[in-house]
Amino acid sequence: MTALYAIVILLEVLQPRIEGPESALQLATEDPGLRLQLELLLLVSWWVPFIAWIVTYTLGRIARSLAARRRWRAAGAWIAVGVLLAPHLVQTPAIVGGSGAWAVGCAVTTAVGLFLITRLQRFDRMSWWILVCALGWGALIATGFALGFSTLVNDFLPAYTFTGDVSIAGVDAWRHQAVVGQIITAGFGEELAKGAGIVLVCGLFRHRLTGVVSGIVIGASVGLGFNFSESLLFLARAEGSADVFQFYGRQGVSLMAAHLAFSAVVGAGVGLALQLRRRIDKLAAIGAGYLLASCCHFATNVLLGYLSLSQGVWLPDNDAVYALVVIPVFFVVMHAPLTVLYLLMARFGLTSQAKGLAEQLDKEAATGYGAITPTEVPVLLSPRRRFRRKLLELRGHGLKAYRRLDRLYATQLRLGTYRWLVARGDLRPTTTGAEVLRERAVQCKLSMLDEPTTGQPDTAGKFSMAGAAR
């Protein structure tokens, strides 16, 4: 991604400016001199990670303590990551900032979509900031790379390879090349940008992932972020009442399909790869997810272009009918199989997770530590019973009691998930991993001792174990 973006900036700096300097990167400045300085700064900035790595590596080598060496290496890594990602952030703020009230509407629908997709996590749930990182990658980094890659393929490539044949056939061939480039850009370039973020987020937070379900949720979050910025880009370009149809199509009809479904399939492949042992199997799972998403994206763009050209030919020449009937039917036909696929994979992952949790929760309850008791295991394995129990706490004792019970369930499920991942070989055991989670669960129970009970079946056992731990 960095290499391709560097080529875009290099061509942007060196391109001949005949009718005036127009920035292909959409830099947020109207001063040609300042814009050129920003472009040169972005081009030169890629030397910074190399220099930062040499300096921090040298300082780490001469540091006396192991902690100091790790701090220097971490500093160099974060500097390198920040500089490498900074160029991709150039274009996106201008898109979001110039969208006005539409940004608020897209933010609301994106939040609703994120809430719905997180409901797939029926047991152990990832922290909200992991999903924010994934959403931010899709909205900022992936969108910036996609715009730069689009400039490279759709503008620079045809312009630099144009043979100069100004005949009708030559111009038609050049336009066909540009259209094919645009389709390829959307089908493979955008999925490359989103897929890279999915792999990075899953790699950084692997200790909090449970497999296919976590990969699907992270992938869907990246897709939602990308759909948010892309919707604002098309809304800014829309004229007249077309902005309403753009919002309806991108943030309504296709919100839980399209980019969300594409990225969810890639995330499912990455999540599945975390459960595989051989490297060839891991690469096959990730590659299959990426290839499927790219081909579906490619086919979607081709057919959408065909339908837009067919309006008034064999489709009714009515914008309302086209937007309210044709487009919804198209998305149902094209994206229903992909949506069903990632939902079925999520169900498969949840079934496997429930089976593993049942075994490990029973083993943890049999230890007698008190973090989990035998009567609590059925409640922990049933999302409905957990939800009903928390509602009873909310009705009977208020929000504070509800939050305490929710924290207890989350800690117990994290403990069971930790044991399951260790037993499966997906996570390396630590000397204090299970002990810390057990202590945290017991502390949650101790904090509930002063609260009045609701008279539920496992309450007595829970408090007796907490009292024994005290």
Image (spheres, rainbow, N blue to C red):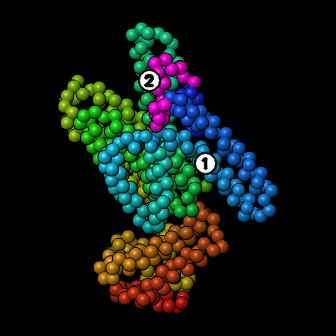
Asked whether disc 2 touches disc 1, contact meaning CB atoms under 8 Å apart, the reply is no
**Would you identify the image quadrant in which residue 408 lies?**
bottom left
- Image location (x, y in percent) of residue 159: 49, 20
When the figure is inspected, residue 301 is found, relative to residue 168, above or below; the finding is: below
**Residue in front for this viewpoint, 433 or 461:** 433
At label 1, the amino acid type is: Val
Range drawn in magenta: 14-31
Q: Please indicate, yes or no, whether residue 447 appears anywhere in the rendered image.
A: yes
Q: Please indicate, yes or no, whether residue 327 appears anywhere in the rendered image.
A: no
When the figure is inspected, residue 449 is found, relative to residue 332, above or below; the finding is: below
Q: Is residue 409 left or right of residue 76?
A: left
The residue under the point 40% across, 15% down is 172
User: Does residue 108 belong to the magenta stretch?
Assistant: no
User: Tag 1's secondary structure?
Assistant: helix
Q: Is residue 263 left or right of residue 72?
A: left
User: Tag 2's secondary structure?
Assistant: helix
- Image location (x, y in percent) of residue 193: 50, 42
- Image location (x, y in percent) of residue 316: 19, 29
Label 2 to label 1, Cα distance in Å? 33 Å
Q: Mainly helix, strand or loop, the magenta region?
A: loop
**Which residue in the protein does label 2 denote?**
178
At label 2, the amino acid type is: Ala
**Residue in front for this viewpoint, 192 or 363:** 192
**Which residue in the protein does label 1 denote?**
81
When the figure is inspected, residue 81 is found, relative to residue 129, above or below; the finding is: above
- Quadrant, the N terminus: top right
- Quadrant, the C terminus: bottom right
